[in-house]
Image: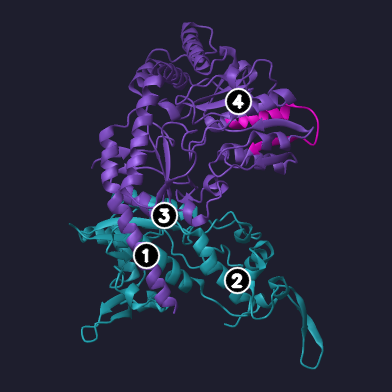
């Protein structure tokens, strides 16, 4: 069966160059980076190189990069690590309503411990207003955490403006850049962030590895206790193969970004434009321009997204809607709800996310399937509503 | 093109065997499980016993089992989320019924609304001609009248047709009960013969969203934490909290005989 993968915001295919860089770490250079001997030194050297590659991607110094198990750990380390290290009581943090669950649920946990958390709203396009952040600051505010780019709608937040506000008030500023890394340029100096999370598997490195940028001089408490790894900021034997993969993926992103971005953007815009042209009553969720280049969140009026998603999958097309709960079913999207969409509209939206591996031909395949599928589902929902009314009479 | 059938999979022996049977009859089979209730909700926790995690209709472990069986049979499988509809159309009427002193059977409403309305509609949306379930019952079309008739299962000891009494003609037309002709022991034997991973799993009996069967406690917790008051208007009172409250038991001539723990703890039958 023909298969097309348009769920690259969930995860991506590991690039062959990344695989190539990782394999020797399993067979020859399998040492523990803390060991004194040759094996350990080789592993350490590979890790140092990867650290430099990640630092280059973010315009940071290598000693400002801490390797983690991924985006969730990076977010947890940033938020809990800062809140725990700042002395005092009655602490307050500011975040937004459209953050990833790794941030939102960490915030909820902190609330149970007595930390005050403000979740600022977003506008109808899904953008945070920096003035709203400024308004929410209190003398107790210790941290602001606003994502760089949203995973569901791709909205790029005014990080730089928020960074300036945070700096002026001497408040730590963290950004979850998991969906931005490898897709748009990231410069920690320019953004004015103290902490920045990335995850390898969102840009062609494997799952289970990520990094947290921690600005030099930032005091942070570790989540894990054990050895002195990562300058005492993250105990646990370093996952060298994955770290090397993350480094390679960062290097690839640096060299290919300009080319890839242009191509992906063109394909995405073509897909979006054709969808709107061929299927009536479809529209875009989120901002049209302030958006990462690979993401299109499209609303198909009168279509239940869950049904469309299954139909697409049965036809070999992978995309997504909302976020998965423990059972694997779809939960209502807190992001679309925060945009002000009523439930029926939130439940008729689908996210398509492309990568550098997406081809024009794959996009054509999906474009040829969609109109008939959407038409059939609309016809059915119409029939169902009619029969429901008749039964109720 | 082969006919596409959706099988409602609960992760139990019955629906798993029904899925295998349909596949052996040559249909293109797609498995769906329903996510109906969040078992971490306080109403469903059980103070006396460890919350029962399986043997109900739609717990995480059961969905895990359904997925395992679907994978074993190489069927496409999806979990559909009907949590909101389940609360509105099954749980709230169940609680309201209890507060009015009735003894509701939520499984009937769950069949009517969840399986044979929402799930049937999902099935047709994904291109299936029929929805199959693991119920022990039979459907046949009366040749004289053209109407579809709901019949008891051949194995009357396991018959579930009673829980299906609300089904309409248009629903019956699109339903398959592949187990209606078999006895429970035959089904278990088939499950073992087909090496289904769940062939030894015990049957489920209780109301799925109330593990531990403490219905009174569920009603109290739900009312105290539950949704907005207007969703709970009963014929007795506009304040459901009033109904679920304890009070004296008084004889007709005015003697206080004791204390009761709310009308919902005293149901007929």
Residue wearing tag 3: A301
Relative to residue A196, is residue A1 drawn left or right? left
Residue at image point 60% right, 56% down: B41
> Subunit of mark 3?
A
Q: Quadrant of residue A365?
A: top left
Residue wearing tag 2: B95
Residue wearing tag 1: A382
Q: Nearer the viewer, mark 2 or mark 4?
A: 4
Residue A170 in sight from this viewpoint: no
Residue A148 x, y percent position in the rendering: 55, 30
Relative to residue A124, is residue A304 drawn left or right? left
Image position of A110 with respect to B59: above or below: above
Alpha carbon separation for disc pair 2 and 1 = 32 Å
Alpha carbon separation for disc pair 4 and 1 = 47 Å
> Subunit of mark 1?
A
Relative to residue A33, is residue B256 drawn left or right? right
Which residue range is magenta in the image? A75-95
> Subunit of mark 2?
B
Q: Colour of chain B?
A: cyan
In this rendering, do the residues under marks 3 and 1 share a single chain?
yes
Q: Earlier in the sequence, mark 3 or mark 4?
A: 4
Q: Earlier in the sequence, mark 3 or mark 1?
A: 3
Q: Earlier in the sequence, mark 4 or mark 1?
A: 4
Residue A91 in magenta stretch = yes
Q: In which quadrant is the C terminus of chain A drawn?
A: bottom left
SS assignment at label 4: helix
B21 vs A360, nearest the viewer: A360
Q: Colour of chain A?
A: purple
Question: Which mark is drawn over residue B238?
Answer: none
């Amino acid at each position: 069966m023909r298969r097309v993968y348009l769920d690259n915001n969930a995860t991506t295919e590991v690039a062959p160059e990344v695989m190539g860089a990782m394999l020797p770490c399993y067979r020859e250079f399998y040492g523990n980076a803390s060991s004194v001997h040759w094996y350990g030194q080789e592993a350490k050297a590979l890790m140092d190189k990867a650290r430099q590659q990640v630092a280059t991607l973010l315009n940071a110094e290598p000693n400002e990069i801490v390797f983690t198990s991924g985006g969730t750990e990076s977010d947890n380390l940033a938020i809990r690590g800062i809140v725990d290290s700042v002395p005092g009581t009655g602490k307050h943090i500011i975040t937004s309503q459209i953050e990833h669950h790794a941030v939102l649920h960490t915030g909820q946990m902190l609330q149970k411990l007595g930390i005050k958390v403000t979740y600022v709203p977003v506008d109808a396009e899904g953008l945070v207003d920096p003035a709203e952040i400024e308004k929410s600051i209190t003398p107790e505010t210790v941290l602001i955490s606003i994502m760089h780019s949203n995973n569901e709608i791709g909205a790029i937040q005014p990080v730089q403006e928020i960074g300036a506000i945070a700096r002026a008030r001497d408040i730590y500023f963290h950004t979850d850049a998991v969906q931005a890394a490898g897709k748009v340029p990231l410069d920690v100096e320019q953004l004015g962030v103290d902490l920045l999370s990335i995850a390898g598997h969102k840009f062609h490195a494997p799952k289970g590895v990520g990094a947290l940028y921690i600005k030099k001089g930032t005091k942070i408490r570790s989540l894990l206790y054990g050895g002195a790894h990562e300058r005492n900021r993250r105990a646990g034997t370093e996952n060298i193969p994955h770290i090397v993969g993350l480094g390679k993926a960062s290097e690839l992103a640096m060299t290919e970004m300009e080319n890839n971005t242009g191509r992906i953007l063109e394909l995405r815009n073509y897909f979006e434009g054709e969808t709107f042209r061929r299927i009536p009553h479809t529209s875009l969720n989120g901002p049209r321009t302030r958006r990462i280049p690979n993401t299109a969140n499209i609303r198909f009026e009168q279509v239940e997204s869950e049904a469309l998603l299954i139909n697409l999958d049965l036809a070999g097309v992978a995309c997504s809607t909302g976020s998965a709960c423990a059972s694997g079913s779809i939960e209502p999207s807190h992001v679309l709800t925060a945009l002000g969409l009523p439930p029926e509209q939130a439940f008729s939206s689908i996210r398509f996310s492309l990568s550098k591996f997406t081809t024009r031909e794959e996009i054509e395949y999906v474009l040829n399937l969609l109109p008939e599928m959407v038409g059939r589902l609309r016809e059915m929902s119409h029939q169902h509503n009619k029969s429901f009314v008749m039964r109720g009479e | 093109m082969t006919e596409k059938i959706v099988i409602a999979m609960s992760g139990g022996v019955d629906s798993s065997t029904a899925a295998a049977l349909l596949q052996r009859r040559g249909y293109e089979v797609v498995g769906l499980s329903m996510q109906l209730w969040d078992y971490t909700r306080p109403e469903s926790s059980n103070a006396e016993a460890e919350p029962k995690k399986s043997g109900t209709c739609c717990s995480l472990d059961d969905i895990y089992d359904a997925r395992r069986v679907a994978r074993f049979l190489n069927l496409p499988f999806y979990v559909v989320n009907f949590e909101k509809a389940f609360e509105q159309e099954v749980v709230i009427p169940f609680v309201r019924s209890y507060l009015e002193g009735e003894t509701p059977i939520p499984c009937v409403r769950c069949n009517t609304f969840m399986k044979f309305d929402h799930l049937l509609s999902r099935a047709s949306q994904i291109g299936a001609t029929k929805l199959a379930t693991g119920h022990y019952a039979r459907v046949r079309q009366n040749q004289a009248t053209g109407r579809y008739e709901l019949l008891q299962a051949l194995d009357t000891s396991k018959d579930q047709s009673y829980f299906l009494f609300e089904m309409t003609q248009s629903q019956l037309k699109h339903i398959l009960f592949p187990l209606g002709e078999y006895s429970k022991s035959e089904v278990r034997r088939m499950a073992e013969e087909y090496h289904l991973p769940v062939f030894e799993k015990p049957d489920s009996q209780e109301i799925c969203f109330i593990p531990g069967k403490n219905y009174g406690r569920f009603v109290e917790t739900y009312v105290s934490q539950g949704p907005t008051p207007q969703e709970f208007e009963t014929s007795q009172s506009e304040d459901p909290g009033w109904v679920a409250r304890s009070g004296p038991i008084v004889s007709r001539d005015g003697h206080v005989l004791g204390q009761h723990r709310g009308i919902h703890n005293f149901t007929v039958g």
